[in-house]
Image: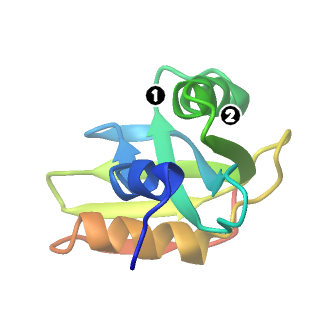
Amino acid sequence: MCTQTRAAALMANIPRVDIDPSGVFKYVLIRVHSKEEGDDSEIDIVRGYGWAEYHADIYDKVSEELEKGGHLDCECIGGGRINHDPQAKKIHVYGYSIGFGRANHAVATEKLKAQYPDYEVTWDNEGY
């Protein structure tokens, strides 16, 4: 018998990427964990928005929303910036977060490539 935990079911429905449709903005890489006994499932998600003055603004909003039901726990595993140019179909990931450190841009880039398969998605560790 295969039983899926509530947390695993919730995680299956979380979009792996949610970023603004264009512009240069801060982003965070968030690891979402199950809080349920015996369930060690986790996923990494990318969130980036132009409204955020600080990386923590994004993390606080997203983690509060995801942790609401008590089944999930979030951890910010770094941040940076995204330059999203929809006309050129290019996304560039770079920089770091002073509060959370540098995200693993290679992980973020793989998530972005899956979401935007027809885009050129690049990254480097330069810039702030």
Separation of marks 2 and 1 at Cα, in angstroms = 10 Å
- According to the picture, the residue beneath numbered tag 2 turns out to be 55
- According to the picture, the residue beneath numbered tag 1 turns out to be 50
Q: Position of residue 105 (x, y in %)?
A: 60, 69
Q: Which is nearer the N-term, disc 2 or disc 1?
A: 1
- Identify the element where label 1 is drawn: loop
Circle 2 residues within 10 Å: few <14, some 14–19, many ≥20: many
Mark 2 belongs to which amino acid?
His
Q: Position of residue 26 (x, y in %)?
A: 57, 39
- Residue 112 lies left or right of residue 58; in this view the side is left
- Above/below status of 118 relative to 33: below
Q: Is residue 128 visible?
A: no
Q: Residue at x 19, y 51 (%)?
A: 86
Q: Position of residue 53 (x, y in %)?
A: 63, 21
- Foreground disc of the pair 2, 1: 2
Q: Residue at x 38, y 49 (%)?
A: 14
Q: Residue at x 63, y 32 (%)?
A: 70
Closest to the observer: 1 or 21? 1
- Identify the element where label 2 is drawn: helix
Q: How many marks?
A: 2
- Residue 22 lies left or right of residue 38; in this view the side is left
Task: Farthest residue to the front: give it.
Answer: 1
Q: Position of residue 115 (x, y in %)?
A: 27, 64
Closest to the observer: 96 or 111? 111
